Amino acid sequence: MSSTASKVMKFGKICGKNQALTCVQLGFLEPNHKPSLHLKKKARLCIQGFLQLPGVDYDETFAPTGKFSTLLILLTLAIEKELPLRQFDVKAAFLYAPLKENLYIKTPEGSKRKSPYLRLKKSLYGLKQAPANWFETLTSWLKDINFHQSTSDPCLFIHSDRHSFVFFHVDDLIVAGKVDIFEDLFLLRFPNSSAHDPDTLLGMDLHQTKDSVALSQPKLIQKGLELLGMEECKPVRTPLSPGISLIAASQEEKEAFQKLKINYRSHTGLLNFLACQTRPDLAPAVSILSSFNSNPGIKHWSQVLHCWKYLKGTMDLKLTLRPDKIDSSKAVKYYTDSTWADDLEYRLSRSGSICFWKACPVAWNSKKQKNIALSSTKAELNALSDGVQESQWITYLIEELWKEKLNPTEFNIDNQGLLEKIKNFGSNSKTKHLDIKMKWLRELKNSNQINVKLIPSEEMVADALTKPSGAESLRRLQERCFLVLFSPN
């Protein structure tokens, strides 16, 4: 057994309730950050963790994945404060994490050792507790070098001098601030890891200038088009056909789609990954199309293809973070909107919201409401209420990073009736049931935590997050998120 392997496992006999787990050897290609090399070959021993017994082989499971909004807010801070950025990739991260339980594996195939079993000393890939053990290892080290954990996101750490910040998603880290000092300490603790200027992060291309950071996923879009054989398709202007209303598929439509032998869920999943990271303009389309994952029909599939045609023509759009240096309001700005009973089958409404900090998009959402709204005011109230709840942790996070008290969060709505209800106490027969949410919002307004403003519908950025919008509504969202100007044609 090599010296490296001896740090990970040792020969042993099984005792007590333990059973030997099996493992597989995986080989794959991985992108290389060195200019001279594009791909490198790697091999990994992976435990078949699905054989583990809860309470015997493991207790807790946890994967340290930071919130995407946290990353966007941290990048906004780095741009505004002109903090250097550096990315760190931990090689074989789980092998740095000690294993608490007594676990055994069958000796891997091809080994020259005759012992049938090996006792694990480190957290190999595939073990259910491996990510949690790695999280404990990494965070303990960060605390040792004077970082403290954010109260808003467990995967964000702030140095005691407030000049360095660390965000991580499992074993990928991005650091803002005193990156050279951090790199020396990091490579000493986790040898053979890589440190480089950020270029790709969590499947995204990252392009940095002096006053902005742009995130995009053209490779993933190209991959999706190739999987569908749509590399030469004709682009369209919107993710879904404007005004379309999709309902459950008929038996004939289901059978027509089944003949294609296509995994509908995998394609909506790919679209969802884009919508959650760099393409907020896809959010309503993905939400609508994913609601038919269990029983898709041919009409639903045609709209999935329509979405990919839209991506063909907008592949180069980049989610752009460029803090507005003129804006001195010190307030998080939200736009919330909703449809009313536009679901023809269940009469549910759809909420849409988007959050800006210093003119940078940091959070967005499009989702079907859970209950039927008896009025448009109720539907708009649901959207506003959800936005206010989300804004609270975002406000805490920003105050923690900027170390300053923010002004009341600004909520922009376009429903006159809702604004009147928030301002004025009282109810009538149509709005009496709104009492609890309305009183809560009124309490926040009176305590100067939120500020609700009425804006014209023509300025409602969140309108494109509520339904299959036309090109004009979509353009408002695109111009705010991607910082590009579109011709009306």
Image (cartoon, helix red, strand yellow):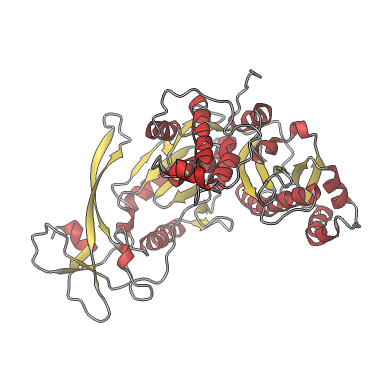
Return the x and y of residue 214 as percentages of the image width and height.
Answer: 52, 32
Picture quadrant of residue 49:
bottom left
Look at the image and tell me whether residue 53 can be seen: yes
Residue at horizontal 79 percent and vertical 47 percent from the top: 376
Picture quadrant of residue 124:
bottom left
In terms of depth relative to the viewer, which is nearer, 456 or 32?
456
Looking at the rendered image, the quarter that the C terminus falls into is top right
In terms of depth relative to the viewer, which is nearer, 321 or 15?
15
In terms of depth relative to the viewer, which is nearer, 101 or 78?
101
Return the x and y of residue 460 as percentages of the image width and height.
Answer: 73, 35
- Which residue appears farthest toward the front when viewing the image? 252
Q: Is residue 385 above or below residue 216?
A: below
Number of on-image labels: 0
4 to the left or right of 162? left
Residue at horizontal 38 percent and vertical 63 percent from the top: 133
Return the x and y of residue 69 as percentages of the image width and height.
Answer: 57, 46
